[in-house]
Image (spheres, coloured by chain):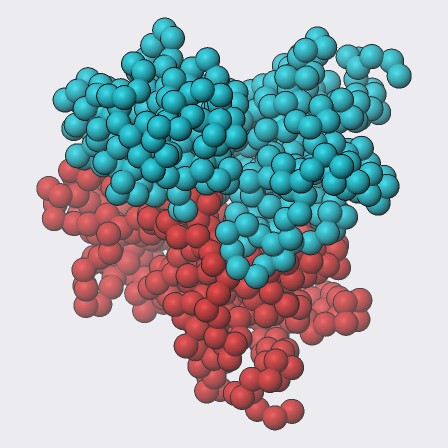
Chain colours: A red, B cyan
Amino acid sequence: MNLPDLGQRRIILLTAGHTDHGRAKTAVNLLRYKPSEVVGILDPSHAGQSAQSVFGIGGEVPVRASFDDLPPANIALIGIAPSGGRLTSDLRQQVVDAIQHRLHIVSGLHQFLNDDPELASHARKHGVLLQDVRKNMERDVANRSGLRSACLRVHTVGHDCNVGKMLVSVELTQALRKIGVDAKFVATGQTGIMIEGEGCPVDAVVADFLNGAAEKLVLAHQHHAVLMIEGQGSLTHPRYSAVTLGLLHGCMPDALILCYEMGRTHVSGMDGIPLRSLNEFRVLYETMANLSHPCQVIGIAMNSRRFTTSEAAAERDRVQSELGLPVCDVLRDGPSALVEAIFNRSRELGHAWPPPQ
Amino acid sequence: MNLPDLGQRRIILLTAGHTDHGRAKTAVNLLRYKPSEVVGILDPSHAGQSAQSVFGIGGEVPVRASFDDLPPANIALIGIAPSGGRLTSDLRQQVVDAIQHRLHIVSGLHQFLNDDPELASHARKHGVLLQDVRKNMERDVANRSGLRSACLRVHTVGHDCNVGKMLVSVELTQALRKIGVDAKFVATGQTGIMIEGEGCPVDAVVADFLNGAAEKLVLAHQHHAVLMIEGQGSLTHPRYSAVTLGLLHGCMPDALILCYEMGRTHVSGMDGIPLRSLNEFRVLYETMANLSHPCQVIGIAMNSRRFTTSEAAAERDRVQSELGLPVCDVLRDGPSALVEAIFNRSRELGHAWPPPQ
């Protein structure tokens, strides 16, 4: 269920000791994209510090050990993504405390809070709601019809999980809107949905209806000029390749932006599984995408956060010349190279909106 | 929930007017593989006929308009697969009647009978159970580890839905067992599970856990010498490609058998979407399979049921020479060409069990 209109949302993030951008990506991205809404972070293991010092983002937002030490709030939001989407026991205790403090709960876990009779009755008793962002009843199959050809569908794909596909989608949407293009961020994961306020948690859809859910999402928003459709996982990911392909086939992109993290050589969080080269990924994504709709990789989004500016610049030049595609780190370099690539693809398809070259 | 031990199962199939092998595939395959258990078919639109005359299989099993005209039974089994797995209103009425006649209900629909409060209370009142074969709580991700290399994993894949992947898997399992090979049919769909009595309905698993569910299934049965793993959908299917890839990556096959229906040129049940050539499918499946585990297409299973013997023979020769692979229709030609291909692949991998060449 959705939360009622709370007027100003004042969110406390629950992070349970996790600080790395992979595990705590929901918290990090709420700090990045909802700075006016996040008032504090509950995390006993980093109590007394600031968001900036713990997560490298979020400025002076306080990290504290108890709700009583944090500013008044109306929402507690689970800011981490534990393996398998399960509610760990320490996190569960914090949710119980939050309910006691009369905070509504927002959760992106696979394990639904509303299915926990104790939490549900505790929430009822304290007059708060439990919002399970991943809960869905998607039951429609894809039909591959009804597309509006004047809408450009751009999809971010990756060489692995947690490389910044959502971030690139949001940054490009914002950049396009800033110059007057009617662009829409189409969220497909729990964090994106929390930021955008709508979307479909495709990884939580029953497998037979995954392609259909992605297609429905595209059809619902195609009155916009450009859709920036958030990607999930990777076509080579041992765990999540099904999600990646269902989304890729269902959303029928005209253009792909291949996102990768500089320096990452192996699948994150799994031992000894090497990642393929960027060019192999390009071929793989184009091959699979073209099974549903004519599509090209139009640019590379590099995540260079572990490297210096000069190392990142050297990598950017190398990849650019190797693949013959525009490359940028949207945070470091700004997104203009990829915005231009989007313009080019739209011109190629004969759309009316992009400025003449 | 599973049914109690009923001693001898006496099944009545509900087919609601559907007779084609696509829509009524559950009924057709129960008639084929559980002939001693199926005592009758409830179908008012074909009442008075025999299973053989309506479905081309099942001999004198009677098709009747009411339960009272059918032999005594203890199970009513929904024998069709409506689009989206929904319970149609006429089917629902038959389920109500079946419960009234004190029959347990077996359903492979996505829409769970146990979630229907009226059906659930009706069943309780009459002391029968509702078994939703697709119901699952799969919540484990894949780990790509723990494989027993002495077990050969053979996976049937297809150019489309409803081409006979399950049938080929069962026939090859039976053929291998007949010559003393410890082979196991690994069911991944509702009909296969009804026949084998176990398995995982992978298309009903939450997408994030699909690869993991397939991997678990393989690990659970790898004490056998050969696993014949039932495939689902197709890598190019607009609706079900996610299911196909999650299963392919999760079950990590050593060998693929590519199944197709002779004469089918377009995706079944969808307008105007052409199928690719068999060789394109071979390349596509090998490419995607090898992302998780070394794998080859070792043979082609042809479904030639719409053609004459001589037409089928000509097609078999043509495909065999075009692809350089063994080809057979397992029902028409027997499965020996594919059994030999399985032997060869196992010898290639250094397994101890296959007879010397």
User: Image point 29% across, 14% down: which residue?
Assistant: B72
Residue A357, given in percent of the width and then of the height, sits at 65, 91
User: Image point 50% across, 51% down: which residue?
Assistant: B269
Question: Horizontal placement of A4 versus A257: left or right?
Answer: left
Quadrant hosting residue A327: bottom right
Depth check: A2 or B317 in front?
Answer: B317
What count of labels does the image hold? 0
Depth check: A317 or A4 in front?
Answer: A4
Depth check: A299 or A260 in front?
Answer: A299
User: Image point 29% across, 30% down: which residue?
Assistant: B65
Question: Horizontal placement of B14 versus A286: left or right?
Answer: left
Of all residues shown, which one is farthest toward the right? B357
Above/below status of A43 relative to B215: below
User: Image point 29% across, 61% down: which residue?
Assistant: A39
Q: Is residue A217 visible?
A: yes
If the image is split into quadrants, where does the N terminus of chain B sit?
top left
Quadrant hosting residue A110: top left
Residue B154, given in percent of the width and then of the height, sits at 68, 28
Residue B107, given in percent of the width and then of the height, sits at 36, 30
Q: Is residue A113 visible?
A: no
Question: Horizontal placement of A113 versus B233: left or right?
Answer: left
Question: Horizontal placement of B72 versus A155: left or right?
Answer: left
Above/below status of B60 relative to B110: above
Of all residues shown, which one is farthest toward the bottom? A356
Residue A148, given in percent of the width and then of the height, sits at 48, 75
Above/below status of B343 relative to A125: above
If the image is split into quadrants, where does the C terminus of chain B sit?
top right
Of all residues shown, which one is farthest toward the top? B7
